[in-house]
Image: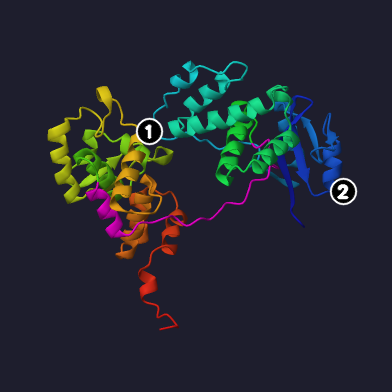
Amino acid sequence: MEKRYVTLKHLMVAEEKCVGIQYFSDKVLDALVKDLPGVKWSEQFRMNYIKNTTENLDRVFNVFRGVAWVNCNHFYSKSSFRRNAEAPDVQALRNREVTEGKRSCPESYLAKLELKCYAINTVRTYVSCFEAYMNYFDDKELHEINENDIRAYLQTLIQNGCSHSYINQAINSIKFYYEVVLEMPNRFYAIERPRVQEKLPQVLAKDEVLAIIQHTNNIKHRCIVSFLYSAGIRRSELLNLELRDIDSQRMVVRIRSGKGNRERYSILSDKLLQDLRKYYKEWRPRKYLFEGPKGAKYSAESVVKIVKEAARKAGVRKNTTPHMLRHSFATHLLESGTDLRYIQVLLGHKSTKTTEIYTHVATNIFFKIKNPLD
């Protein structure tokens, strides 16, 4: 006997939460669905639906038990809590001044981001994208916006030249509100996403990196640039480093605030350690390894300026950024024969697929190929 499948999906019909029932039509399933109390057909979603109540859900499972497999992947959300994650500080977002006439992110949105322990950079991105979305529909309440409205909004972003990355972030921020804050998982399952642009990372040559380090203004700047390259860390991870994270006995650095709240270790350069000792004697940081005025975290903008200014002085014509030093770290390790799995661990990548991008920019394999012209 051919196996039957039924998929449950969250729908919002006439501002009421409903359960969508999607399946390939046959006589048996049509008859069972027809017998469900209060079942209706939605021309907009092209499926049957009933009110979302505990009793109706029990009826659905009882009706299809032994007859069809009920797919709930689109209905019940997976837990996104992270172990050992600290709640982000979103108080600054609550207390900020909002431009007159503009709508600000609902408190329920901020509270859920805080509860889910999202990284502070993710929080800022979600809030920024969602507020842009809210204010685009300044003549509509949030519950009045439907899938077609959202498609029109995304189309406007595309026409305005927004990057694929930004559009995906906008979709994530919108889905977070309806599916997590309002507890309607996968309501917008039909919203199309732009194709991911597969761009190769920009990489510096080893000589260029060394030249940039040599052309920094002082020992503090030298340590900052050296750390970005020698440990392969992100700018945000560098700014969150504390003195206790440097383990000179094991020659590793502990990165506590990695992407996705994942902790990891990276390698510590012996040359950098010597510079760090000189830097510590001169600058005497108290908590964070690199501090700004009054012991606060060093600013992200200052790190960018340090890298760019040193690159300019070194005569490097590439548009050098802090993240380019991370790319260079990974590529140079791969070219020297380091196993890709070790590089994945050092970079803190969740999947090896992310790390494999560096195999496309590593040049050591090209040296083994004889050019047909030669």
Q: Viewer-proximal residue, 52 or 352?
A: 352
- Packing grade of label 1 (10 A; few <14, some 14-19, many >=20) is few
Residue drawn at x 57%, y 32% is 129
Q: CA distance from mark 1 to mark 2?
A: 51 Å
Residue 210 in magenta? yes
- Total labels drawn: 2
Vertically, is 372 above or below 253?
below
- Percent across and percent down for residue 46 are 81, 41
Q: Is residue 161 visible to us here?
A: yes
Q: Is residue 99 left or right of residue 262?
A: right
The amino acid at mark 2 is: Lys
- Packing grade of label 2 (10 A; few <14, some 14-19, many >=20) is few
Q: Which disc number belongs to residue 27?
A: 2
Residue drawn at x 71%, y 24% is 143
Q: Is residue 119 visible to us here?
A: no
- Percent across and percent down for residue 125 are 51, 33
Q: Earlier in the sequence, mark 1 or mark 2?
A: 2
Q: Is residue 112 left or right of residue 362?
A: right
Q: Is residue 284 left or right of residue 79?
A: left
Q: Is residue 114 left or right of residue 60?
A: left
Q: Which disc number belongs to residue 72?
A: none
The residue indicated by pointer 1 is 84
Residue drawn at x 19%, y 40% is 219
Q: How is the image coloured?
A: rainbow
The amino acid at mark 1 is: Asn
- Percent across and percent down for residue 233 are 33, 45
Point out the stretch of residues depicted in magenta.
186-215
> Could you say which quadrant of the image residue 279 lies in?
top left
